[in-house]
Amino acid sequence: MVDAQKFERLSILSQQLNEQCSTLNDTITEWNKRLLALNLGLEVWLNPFDYSGVYYAENDSDVRQKCVKEISLGYAKVDGQWQLAIKEEFLIAGNEEREQDVPIRVTRLLSCTREMRIKAMERFDSLLSHIEEEVTQRLQIVAKAQKLAEIDKP
């Protein structure tokens, strides 16, 4: 028999989860706006944070190959707009060179499942740090290239 009190507690928790996830969507939307306003134009991905299950993919010769799905949080141009995104990459097991991997799927974070959005936001601070590192590195590369260009001037 079902415990009515358990169901009542679950109902209350469910309502709280729905309210918090609505707030989470607003937070993601706000961060998308803030990052877009920076006009970075850089695609940046964190190392995978989730390795999900085992899948089988068929290659060109209809041979089924064992794959593992890696999931990463990043900032990329998706559907024509820069935004927080999730990258799912299906890796053929035992293929360290990654030459024959199944294509990558990139999805805007707001379109992902609730569970995926929550997992991703756990890594958001790390993503901001990584974006900062990438921008700094790109600035150094551009400065070095400009300095080399000055040397080549007659």
Image (spheres, rainbow, N blue to C red):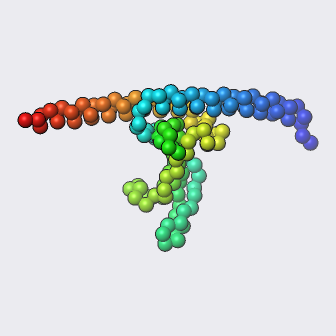
Residue that protrudes farthest toward the right in the picture: 1
Of 10 and 84, which appears nearest the observer? 84
Image coordinates for residue 143, horizontal then vertical, percent:
24, 31
The C terminus, quarter of image:
top left
Tell me which residue sits at (57%, 58%) in the image. Answer: 55
Tell me which residue sits at (60%, 28%) in the image. Answer: 27
Q: Is residue 71 at all visible to an observer of this figure? A: no
Of 10 and 39, which appears nearest the observer? 39
The N terminus, quarter of image:
top right
Image coordinates for residue 47, horizontal then vertical, percent:
46, 41
Of 82 and 48, which appears nearest the observer? 82
Left/right of residue 25 with respect to residue 36 in the rendered view: right
Residue that protrudes farthest toward the bottom in the picture: 61
Left/right of residue 7 with respect to residue 153 in the rendered view: right
Image coordinates for residue 122, horizontal then vertical, percent:
56, 32
Tell me which residue sits at (64%, 42%) in the image. Answer: 113
- Quarter of the rendering containing residue 19: top right
Tell me which residue sits at (66%, 28%) in the image. Answer: 23
Answer above or below: position of 21 versus 66: above
The mark tally for this picture is 0
Q: Is residue 8 at all visible to an observer of this figure? A: yes
Image coordinates for residue 104, horizontal then vertical, percent:
49, 52
Answer above or below: position of 19 versus 78: above
